């Protein structure tokens, strides 16, 4: 039920982000969701892609610094309060969220959130008990 997320360390210089995304595109790797967090000198590009193993190898071969993290993809009703309900489930189970970002399907009524939490197993249990659908890695990679 966990999804592989790539965290790519990118210098904050013109062309560096372009080079990483072009490398992925040239190798037929499709980005499904992403987030960019930055500091003065570098950024962290967090990616969910259609083929994380291939993407990891392509980036490593190009000497790009990456790490792979298991994250949770949860389906959240695309309506006011949908995110609040999911986060409440985690709060009630005393689970901290390190970060999250969202994505949507090309067509559909749901929104999805990628969650990085301190305890994946406990978060999966809390969200499932709260009635939330957890997306499989295969579904996320194919959205």
Image (spheres, helix red, strand yellow):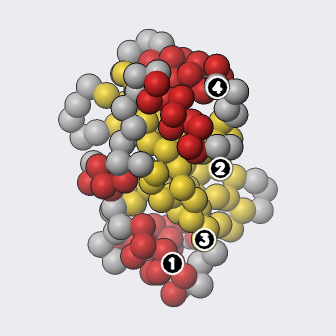
Residue 22 visible, this angle: no
Residue pointed to by mark 3: 66
Name the quadrant containing residue 134: top left
**Would you say the residues marked 4 and 2 are in contact, meaning their CB atoms lie under 8 Å apart?**
no
Q: CA distance from mark 3 to mark 1?
A: 7 Å
Kindly report which numbered mark, 4 or 3, lies closer to the viewer in this rendering: 4
Q: CA distance from mark 4 to mark 2?
A: 27 Å
First of labels 4, 3 by sequence position: 3
Residue pointed to by mark 2: 37
**Residue at (37%, 53%) from the top-left corner?**
137
Query: Circle 2: is it few (<14), some (14-19), or many (20+) Cα within 10 Å?
Result: few
Residue pointed to by mark 4: 93
Q: Secondary structure at mark 1?
A: helix
Q: Secondary structure at mark 2?
A: strand
**Would you say the residues marked 3 and 1 are in contact, meaning their CB atoms lie under 8 Å apart?**
yes
Q: CA distance from mark 4 to mark 3?
A: 31 Å
Name the quadrant containing residue 73: top left
Residue pointed to by mark 1: 59
Q: CA distance from mark 4 to mark 1?
A: 37 Å
First of labels 4, 1 by sequence position: 1
């Amino acid at each position: 039920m966990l999804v592989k997320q790539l965290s790519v360390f990118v210098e904050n210089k013109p062309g560096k982000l372009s080079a990483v995304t072009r490398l992925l595109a040239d190798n037929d790797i499709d980005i499904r969701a992403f987030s960019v967090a930055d500091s003065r000198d570098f950024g962290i590009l967090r990616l969910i892609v259609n083929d994380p193993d291939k993407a990891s190898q392509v980036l490593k071969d190009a000497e790009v610094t990456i790490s792979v993290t298991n994250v949770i993809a949860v389906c959240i009703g695309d309506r006011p309060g949908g995110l609040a309900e999911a986060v409440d489930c985690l709060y009630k189970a005393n689970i901290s969220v390190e970060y999250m970002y969202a994505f949507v399907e090309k067509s559909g009524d749901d929104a999805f959130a990628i969650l990085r939490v301190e305890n994946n197993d406990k978060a999966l249990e809390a969200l499932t008990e709260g009635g939330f659908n957890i997306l499989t890695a295969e579904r996320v990679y194919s959205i």
